Image (cartoon, grey):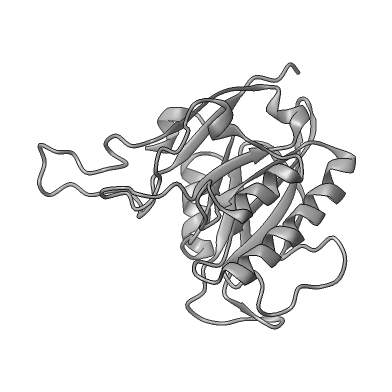
Amino acid sequence: ALAAFQPDIVTLQEGPSEEKVKKFADALNMRYAYFPGGWKGDKVYPGGFPGALVTRFDIGETENRPSATTPHDEELFTRHLGRARLATPFGPLHVVSAHLHPSQHEARMREVAAIVDLIAKLRQTGPVLFQGDLNHRPQTPEYAAWVEAGLVDIGALKGIGDKPTSPSIRPANRIDYIWATPELAKAAQSAEVLDKPPFVPEPAAPSSYALSDHLPVTAEFLIEE
């Protein structure tokens, strides 16, 4: 389904096993970076929520649970946080993928602060694309913190507004985002929530199903090489 869009970069939250991510990347003729989830201290426990980045660009340095300063405590990023430095025709691009805490506001605010610090460090050497399941709506302190840090909500910039992304069946909440540092945001051309078949069930086919429990969000950037 995603191949039809000819994507350059795909990030996955609550991804499958690394073996399946590799098959996914191979099917798209792409490279991948895998970010194990479910952290407790410095160990991964079973039943976590891994993430992944799949891209046609060369992948340079990658890091799981990256930090701008000291290692995170075990209460943060129990789902996933990962980053990769990509070599693109227009120069280096940092991609950050995250899945924030689903229910604890205080933990989520601390996760936001840690990511803001990380992005501030990364953007010293190139633009930053940040996307993921952030588990908060636009009308929240978490969202305000991203804006205050200077990040640009590409969906809002390009007309998605409050269009919901979760759940994929009868969506009610916009909690999945694509953010960019300002220099990258200037190149944004469009954004869309993929809310049509096959990403949702086909109305005329009772046996059809959604491909994920969330609706994908996509954005297009036009950058001169």
User: Is residue 36 visible to the viewer in this orientation of the structure?
Assistant: no
Residue shown at 69% from the left, 80% from the top: 74
Question: What percent of the width, then of the height, locates residue 23?
Answer: 47, 52
Q: Is residue 118 left or right of residue 143?
A: right
Q: How many marks?
A: 0
Can you tell which quarter of the image residue 51 is in?
bottom right
Residue shown at 62% from the left, 55% from the top: 142
Residue shown at 54% from the left, 63% from the top: 18
The correct choice, above or below, for 139 with respect to 189 in the image is below
Q: Nearer the viewer, residue 99 or 93?
A: 99
Quarter of the rendering occupied by the N terminus: top left
Residue shown at 54% from the left, 25% from the top: 158
Question: What percent of the width, then of the height, locates residue 40?
Answer: 64, 82
The correct choice, above or below, for 15 with respect to 191 in the image is below
Q: Nearer the viewer, residue 141 or 185?
A: 141
Quarter of the rendering occupied by the C terminus: top right
Question: What percent of the width, then of the height, locates residue 201?
Answer: 21, 44
| View extreme (top): residue | 224
The correct choice, above or below, for 180 with respect to 221 in the image is below
User: Is residue 6 visible to the viewer in this orientation of the structure?
Assistant: yes
Question: What percent of the width, then of the height, locates residue 47?
Answer: 47, 77
